[in-house]
Amino acid sequence: MLFGTAAVSGSMLLWPLISRASAGGVAQVGAVEAVQLMNRRDAVVLDVRDSSEFAAGHIPNARNIPFNELENRLRELEKMKSRPIIVSAPAGPRAAKVCAALQKIGFTDVVALRGGLNAWVEASLPIQK
C-alpha cells in the first residue's frame, strides 16, 4: 500500500513535465486561464485554423492567421510583442510550431490554448461567428 501511494504521488509530480513534453515543450493554458490572460493582461488570441473554420466559429476578438500563411503574415503581429499571445490551434503539433516561430522573432509571452476551440466550447465560453 505504501508503494502504491508513492507511485501515485510520483506520477502526479511528473505529470506536468510529461504533458509539457507532449505539447512540444510549449507552455499551455486552459480556457479559464486564457480568459484571465485576456482580461487582466490584454492577451491576443491568435487562431491559426483555416479561414473557413474560423468563419464557422471562433473565440471573440481572435485574430485569424491560417497556419499555412503564418510565415508571410508574421509582421501583422509585430506591434503586439509586448502583449501575451494565446495560440488557438487544432490538436497536434501545430500550436507548438506557431509558438516556436513567434518566440524566434522575439515574442516572449506565448502560450498555447490546451484543447483549442473545443476546450473553449466545453468550458461553455462564448464563440463568435
Image (spheres, helix red, strand yellow):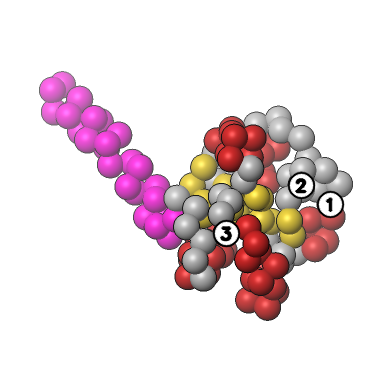
Q: Judge depth for marks 1 and 2 and give the one in front.
A: 2
Which residue is disc 1 drawn over? Answer: 56
Q: Kindly give the residue lying farthest to the top in the view shown.
A: 1
- Whether residue 103 is visible: yes
Give the extent of the magenta segment. Answer: 1-26
Q: Quadrant of the N terminus?
A: top left
Q: What residue is shown with label 3?
A: 81
* Residue at the spot 56% in from the left edge and 50% down from the top edge: 84
Residue in front for this viewpoint, 5 or 38: 38
Whether 99 is drawn above or below 118: the answer is below
Describe the element under mark 3 as helix, strand or loop.
loop
Viewer-proximal residue among 47 and 76 = 76
Percent from the top left, x then y, of residue 120? 66, 39
Using a 10 Å C-alpha cutoff, classify the residue at mark 1 as few (fewer than 14 neighbours), some (14 to 19) or many (20 or more). Answer: few
Name the side, left or right, on which 94 lies relative to 4. Answer: right
Residue at horizontal 76 percent and vertical 47 percent from the top: 61
Instruction: Between residue 21 and residue 60, name the one nearer to us.
Output: 60
> Are there few (<14), some (14-19), or many (20+) residues within 10 Å of tag 2?
few
Amino acid identity at mark 3: Lys
